């Protein structure tokens, strides 16, 4: 077992860290304060190749392996979870789905635009009445002579207001249940497609979150990705990649919390000594270090399994469950180390704390990850 990164991976880590420190970190606080979705910064991230990291080069991607993708995502996540969400949605939920399930025409048509950042994509699975029970899609797709007419509503869709392409999951025949589900590639300028911004989020103020409405949206036959009945499999394979990316971003939050705690504790003095000299402060730092290392190793293991081409659903759920919960704890402890200063946004830990709260909710809640892991261990499906 080799725990070392390759020279190439180490160089990519250093480049991603430098980019994050130069471009993402300086903008994160203002974007958060102003609830600003920074499309200029998204373009810079795209220019680094981070929006198509795992997409083959022939389609405009960077052709990286999954483990290296985690390294890049971790660094972006250390800088800003809102921007990491862009990376996760665009790369994992949208691009990796098209790579795996798209026709050659669909890959040629969309992947180069998505990898270059010319277009953003979004992933429309969740609906107002359909969250964890993702197979229960109410959005309907009806066959016409030339294609399909899609009607319904989607909720909580990241990048939804800015996306030019939406993956829309819909039911083609309610009597077929999940075997009737299909996934459509819908261009968002199609008549009948509308979006509305969702306000009032606890965190991720620098990200874009929308509700989508589809009012008799007509799409051609070629908009169908995969076959009718593949919709649920497409959604689950997208989440296998997306959950991995969320987990990697959370390792970045763990590391950022730890780094900020170490720096502050060595600088801040109380009782005539740096607070780092107090054992109870060191205990908070040690706990963050252990959580960070464990989360990173679980993410790397899931990436290694993916790079072997082996099924990785269980390893991914373990990494997602652990890393997202670890990031909650690390950001919480980091605020404690900072005392009152941790309660305002002079330090990144306040934003980390608010931003990571969603990571145990989206792309499958922690409860859903436990049920996936429990199913793998027992062979019994307790999800429904
Ligand atoms: C900021 C943000 C961005 C998002 N981005 C996207 C996106 O881009 N695309 C997209 O499609 N969705 C997106 N989502 C939606 C997200 O994936 C859902 O919120 C999530 O899947 C949970 O669904 P829900 O909110 O309907 O909760 P519910 O499913 O209603 O769950 C509520 C509670 O019940 C628990 N629960 C539900 N079922 C079970 C069960 N069987 N056993 C035990 N406990 C259970 C849950 O764990 C949770 O604690 C986003 C959400 C947010 C907040």
Image (cartoon, rainbow, N blue to C red):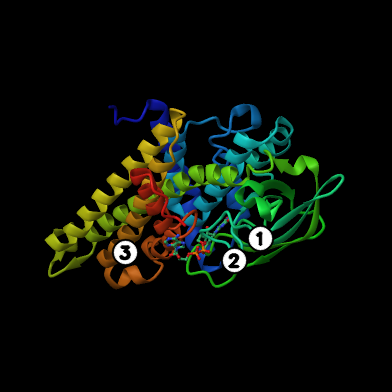
Query: Is mark 2 in CB contact (under 8 Å) with mark 1?
Result: yes
Taking the image as shown, residue 229 lies to the left or right of residue 72, namely right
Where 349 falls versus 177 (above or below)? below
- Which mark sits nearer the N-terminus, 3 or 2? 2
Image quadrant assignment for residue 278:
bottom left
Residue that mark 3 sits on = 332
Taking the image as shown, residue 87 lies to the left or right of residue 306, namely right
Residue beneath the point at 65% across and 42% down:
114
Residue that mark 2 sits on = 129
Q: Is residue 251 visible?
A: no
Q: CA distance from mark 3 to mark 2?
A: 32 Å
Percent x, y for residue 5?
A: 35, 30
Residue beneath the point at 44% across and 52% down:
79
Taking the image as shown, residue 223 lies to the left or right of residue 131, namely right
- Which mark sits nearer the N-terminus, 1 or 3? 1
Is disc 2's CB within 8 Å of ligand 1? Answer: no
Percent x, y for residue 73?
A: 46, 44
Q: Residues within 10 Å of mark 1 (few under 14, many from 20)?
A: many
Residue that mark 1 sits on = 138
């Amino acid at each position: 077992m080799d725990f070392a990164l390759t020279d190439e991976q180490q160089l990519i880590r250093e480049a991603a860290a430098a980019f994050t420190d130069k471009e993402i970190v300086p903008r994160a606080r203002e974007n958060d304060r102003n609830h600003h979705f920074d499309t200029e910064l998204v373009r810079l991230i795209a220019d680094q190749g981070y929006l198509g990291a795992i997409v083959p080069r022939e389609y405009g991607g960077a052709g990286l392996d999954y483990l290296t993708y985690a390294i890049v995502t971790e660094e972006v996540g250390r800088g800003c979870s809102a921007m990491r969400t862009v990376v996760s949605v665009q790369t994992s939920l949208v691009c990796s789905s098209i790579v795996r399930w798209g026709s050659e025409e669909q890959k040629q048509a969309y992947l180069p635009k998505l990898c270059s950042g010319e277009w953003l994509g979004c992933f429309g699975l969740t609906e107002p009445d359909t969250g964890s029970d993702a197979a229960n899609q109410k959005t309907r797709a009806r066959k016409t002579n030339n294609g399909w007419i899609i009607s319904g509503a989607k909720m909580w869709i990241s990048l939804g207001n800015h996306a030019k392409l939406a993956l829309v999951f819909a039911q083609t025949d309610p009597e077929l249940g999940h075997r009737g589900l299909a996934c459509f590639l819908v261009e968002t300028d199609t008549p009948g497609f509308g979006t509305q911004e969702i306000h009032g989020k606890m965190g991720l103020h620098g990200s874009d979150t929308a509700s989508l409405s589809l009012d008799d949206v007509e799409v051609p036959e070629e908009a169908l990705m995969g076959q009718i009945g593949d919709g649920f499999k497409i959604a689950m394979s997208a989440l296998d990649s997306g959950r991995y990316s969320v987990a990697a971003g959370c390792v970045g939050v763990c590391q950022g919390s730890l780094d900020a705690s170490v720096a502050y504790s060595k600088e801040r003095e109380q009782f005539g000594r740096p607070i780092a000299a107090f054992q109870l402060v060191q205990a908070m730092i040690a706990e963050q270090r252990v959580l960070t290392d464990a989360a990173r190793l679980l993410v790397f293991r899931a990436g290694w399994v993916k790079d072997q081409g082996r099924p990785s659903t269980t390893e991914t759920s373990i990494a997602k469950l652990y890393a997202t919960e670890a990031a909650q704890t690390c950001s919480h402890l980091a605020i404690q180390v900072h005392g009152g200063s941790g309660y305002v946004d002079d330090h990144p830990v306040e934003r980390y704390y608010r931003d990571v709260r969603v990571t145990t909710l989206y792309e499958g809640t922690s409860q859903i990850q436990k049920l996936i892991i429990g199913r793998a261990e027992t062979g019994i499906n307790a999800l429904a």
